[in-house]
Amino acid sequence: MEFGIFENQLSHLNPPFTRILGFRRSPDVILRMEMERSMSLFQMMVNEGLVPSAEEEMKRRNAIDKLKKIVVEWVKTVTYQRGLPKKYLKFASGTILTYGSYGLGVYNSESDIDALCVGPYFATIAEDFFIVLHNMLASRPEVSEIHCVKDAKVPLMRFKFDGISIDLPYARLKVISIPENVDVFNPFFLKNIDDTTWKSLSGVRANRSILHLVPNIEIFQAVLRCIKFWAKRRGVYGNLLGFFGGIHLAVLSAFICQRHPSASLSALILLFFKTFGLWPWPTPVILQETIARPFIPADKVSWMPIQLPCSPYEFCHSNITRSTFYKIRTEFLRGHMLTKDMLRPDFDWNILFEPFPYARRYGLFVKIFLSACDKDELGDWVGWIKSRFRSLLVKLEELLGFCDPNPTEYVDTDASEPNVIFYWGLPTGRSDLIDADLVEEYFLKSIDNGYQGATGKMKLSVVKANQLPKKAQFAFERKNTKPCWRVVDDNRKKTNPQSKYKPHCADKYLPTNDSPEYPSAGG
Ligand SMILES: Nc1ncnc2c1ncn2[C@@H]1O[C@H](COP(=O)(O)OP(=O)(O)OP(=O)(O)O)[C@@H](O)[C@H]1O
Ligand SMILES: [Mg+2]
Ligand SMILES: [Mg+2]
């Protein structure tokens, strides 16, 4: 008999959770309702396409296998081009290590694959990676939109492989042959590596540490999927826009899972919002206690410090500003208010995940219109501007006291050139405090160094809520207000959990057929 993630709770209810809920009903009733909440949440994840299909998984695995082969071939080519001894040709090799949302097993169809290319000591980043490997990739029919991002903290190549976005940084180890699943914690491989390699490896090391530290990987993945979905819907996802990136949410979710090893999915979501809604920021969130804490000068302390769980235990890079801190905290508290009475009969997950109602919340918006001659140029131009967005955000904060940078990218299909538009919420009635032309001039000056691509256009203006595209104005109106999995009242007929919508993988979240279906009401 197998109970999956509920095993502990079936034998004895998790006492802290009963206390948190403050329910005086029989633990069995609570348990059953809690399971139903978890199940309905999982159902919603499936309905929203957050759980990839088998074909999607296969497509990504194939892409990674092909990339691995290309990397091995590349290493052989470099060995030959460098005139190294013939025996090297046999042994020299490289590999691909996946990390990010793919490595954590929480990707969906929109996610990129973060793939670290690991090569031997003689394959340099400047020539062999950014030129030789670049050309090999560019000549492949599967590859499109390839460009090099050399000036980033972690330099990388970005391209599409069979339509899947790939981020490919490079790590160079002081060996000739790289094992396919090279151990990135093994000191042997970490000896004398350069700074870029160390930074590139840290992504893989951080991800593997997270998976190592959580008590149950499957439930951690489910929590993180839900939290990422929530963050995207509520407009608090996007590191460049001053919000969370995937790594921040991964550490926060792992923190909750680690502290509540036997809690169910729904309980963990409740605990997530309770914990971080009431968290005494800027106290750092630390997944793994270490003897020595990294020293951070006072002016560099982030609004929401989140530590990476691997040496040298640095804090995740963050662009959070005063405004975005305020927005994130408000959203955490909203999540807490909405989930704290999760067992009440009219509870509905859809409300938690409602899109943030920008048009209803703000009267004014700063419109940032970016365009370029073709799609490739636009991609580079938008990427560059986004990497400088923080300075625009801080300027708007200075002028108006608050700005909410909606991360959603809109497109004006009537415009003559390919374009991307952002609408950032501003406090209503403060239009007299902002001169869009002056702000545009300031921002253009602040980004005018280092960009090597063809400069596109940028136009800043202030617009009213009713000038937003319809899609943005009504995004918050729910089409389907019914919960996707009805909550069962103790005395009413139960909804059949073997609904035709139930995904196969949902079985992990429910007792199996040969287990007691649900403990009966009142024990
Ligand atoms: N701000 C950061 N600080 C530290 N490490 C980071 C940061 N941003 C990214 N990384 C590293 O790069 C990896 C991939 O980042 P990415 O932005 O693609 O996030 P992700 O978790 O893959 O989410 P998504 O599904 O949106 O791609 C992270 O898992 C992390 O290891
Ligand atoms: Mg990613
Ligand atoms: Mg990425």
Image: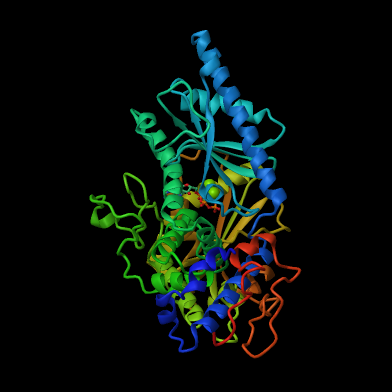
Residue drawn at x 46%, y 43% as measured from the top left = 204
Left or right of residue 252, residue 68 in this image: right
Residue 407 at what x, y percent from top left?
54, 61
User: Who is closer to the viewer here, 97 or 314?
Assistant: 97
Quadrant the N terminus occupies:
bottom right
Dividing the picture into quadrants, the one containing residue 508 is bottom right
As drawn, 140 above or below 365: above
As drawn, 523 above or below 207: below
User: Who is closer to the viewer here, 253 or 247?
Assistant: 253
Quadrant the C terminus occupies:
bottom right
Left or right of residue 243, residue 408 in this image: right
User: Who is closer to the viewer here, 393 or 210?
Assistant: 210
Residue drawn at x 62%, y 46% as measured from the top left = 378
Left or right of residue 439, residue 499 in this image: right
Say if residue 260 shows up in the picture. yes
As drawn, 166 above or below 346: above
Identify the residue at the far right of this view: 500
Dividing the picture into quadrants, the one containing residue 37 is bottom right
Residue drawn at x 47%, y 51% as measured from the top left = 444
As drawn, 126 above or below 287: above
Residue 309 at what x, y percent from top left?
37, 51
Residue drawn at x 42%, y 74% as measured from the top left = 274
Residue 389 at what x, y percent from top left?
47, 55
Say if residue 433 shows up in the picture. no
Residue 478 at what x, y percent from top left?
67, 76
